[in-house]
Amino acid sequence: MTTIHPIFVHFPIALLLTATLISVLAVLFKSKREELKIVLYWILILGAISVLAALFSGLYEDERVVHDEAIHKIMEVHKLLGFIITTVFVLITIWFIIRKRKIRLRELTVMTLLLIGTSGVLVYSAYLGGEMVYEQGAGVKPMEKYMLEMHNGEGHQHSLGIEPETHESAGHIHGNMDSDQHGMKEDSSNQHRNTDSPSGHSHDGHSH
């Protein structure tokens, strides 16, 4: 499966960090504040669009990418942080769009502090994403193949990212194997009983 999440995830990282920097500069430099607010306005809009694309692409792949329990635990934290980042960033963008012309230094300072905090969460979330890929092998085809071979189609369905049909097929195969083995044991038992029992050879046809 071709992963699409990495295509979108870099844009919100760049735009959110840039928006934070521009917002800090707007607070510090009064003479350039209005010009910086215009720049911040467009960066926030583009950032909100990109962070939504990153979130939905991540949710799309969450149930489809092959992963084990170690990756699953990291993925759950990464997903939670994604929801937090998206919510805060979108709300800040809406707030700034509504208050753009009326926003004062105090409001701008509060928004800047929120952006700084969200940027910190974003950096940690990006670190977790890198850990899943570069250390655990999430989305890496050779590693996915290895995980599937190690589990041999068994185990926790969600943690392996395997479709239900695969498990049903695997269960059917294992069921047939168990039936065949049971049949072989019965044949072996029958042969053993036939060996121990009399041959059934009749002497009636012999003349004495």
Image (cartoon, grey):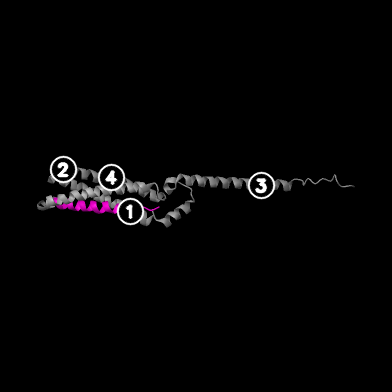
Q: Is residue 160 magenta?
A: no
Mark carried by residue 84:
4
Point out the tag, 1 or 3, that comes first from the N-terminus: 1
- Disc 1 crowd, CA 10 A, few/some/many (<14, 14-19, 20+): few
Residue at position x 38%, y 51% from top?
A: 71
As shown in the figure, which amino acid type bears the numbered disc 2? Arg
Mark carried by residue 187:
3
Q: Please name the residue that numbered disc 2 is placed on.
A: 99
As shown in the figure, which amino acid type bears the numbered disc 3? Asp
Mark carried by residue 6:
1
Measure the C-alpha gap from mark 3 to mark 4. Answer: 63 Å
Q: Is residue 21 magenta?
A: yes
Q: Front-most of 29 and 39?
A: 39
Mark carried by residue 111:
none
Q: Position of residue 19 (x, y in %)?
A: 20, 51
Q: Position of residue 90 (x, y in %)?
A: 24, 44
Q: Front-most of 156 and 14?
A: 14
